[in-house]
Amino acid sequence: MKPSAESFVRRVRSKLDELSSTERQLADFLLEFPGELASYAGNELAQLAGVSPSTVSRFIRRVGYDSYEEARRHVREEQETGSPLFHASSPAAARQVRSVAAHFQQSQQNLAATFERLSDATLAEIARAIVAAPQVFIFGSRSSQAFALYLRWQIIQVLPRVTCLPGPGETLGEYTAGLSERDCVIVFGTRRQTGQMQRLLEAATRTGADLLYISDQASADYAPATWSLQAHCRGPGSLDNHVGVMALCDLLATLVIEASGAAGRKRLAAVEQEHEELGDFD
């Protein structure tokens, strides 16, 4: 079996009962911080785990790799999937990324890298399409659901038919059955999505609806999408940094509100009047 045929963690767990005491010490360290194998040379990893370099070499062969570099490549591939486990750092290695300054710097870099790829003309075209669509459907699962809900919350102030799908207890088919080529579908596809996302992308493509696909730099493009936007989400620690995605949501919402024109302002005024009538806010 090739090493990449199953996860690094699964391979290590399957060999635990066969390891010597020092190899088990290294295994315990790597099960807690598997990403460290991709970040350090063998002798450096040995020092972090408190074992000898020869123990590292034996361990690598024991779990089925021909070389340390082969194991590193496998772990790096798994890091690209976005698993927080593979981005967790040991206490010794994490000190450099715990500071406020490190997180602020990464946020700035992500914002700059995200916005330098944007086009005013493309964003204006997207905003006009969203405003013109009879129905706007927004999808995001896992962490991306928060962005879908936020974007809907903002643009529903000027557009009456904006839906996040699927709702609790609902299926995608209950919505895709009513999709038409005049509608607009917005899909947040930051990494580690569920299988629902691909099925929705394919359904939207079949109907010919306008499709906006928002992903990150580690995710593959969806070629049939009408528009594709990528946010940079690299984090200084074990989690992705999503400031770029949130900034994109804010930018899109602002442009949609502006593009909605007089009709949007009329709805916004009506919404504000209802807030007063219903006493929605203190």
Image: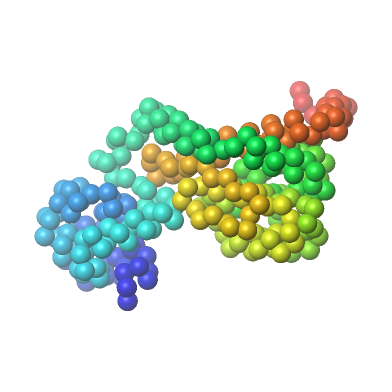
Give me the residue at 21% from left, 57% from top: 26
Q: Quadrant of the C terminus?
A: top right
Residue 81 appears left or right of 142: left
Q: Farthest residue toward the front? A: 121
**Above or below for 66 versus 193:** below
Residue 212 appears left or right of 35: right
Residue placed most toward the observer, 229 or 272: 229
Q: Quadrant of residue 157?
A: top right
Q: Quadrant of residue 100?
A: top left
Q: Quadrant of residue 251?
A: top right
Q: How is the image coloured?
A: rainbow
Give me the residue at 21% from left, 61% from top: 68
Q: Farthest residue toward the bottom? A: 1
Residue placed most toward the observer, 29 or 231: 231
Q: Quadrant of the N terminus?
A: bottom left
Give the number of callouts: 0
**Above or below for 194 versus 128:** below
Q: Is residue 177 visible?
A: yes
**Above or below for 114 versus 223:** above
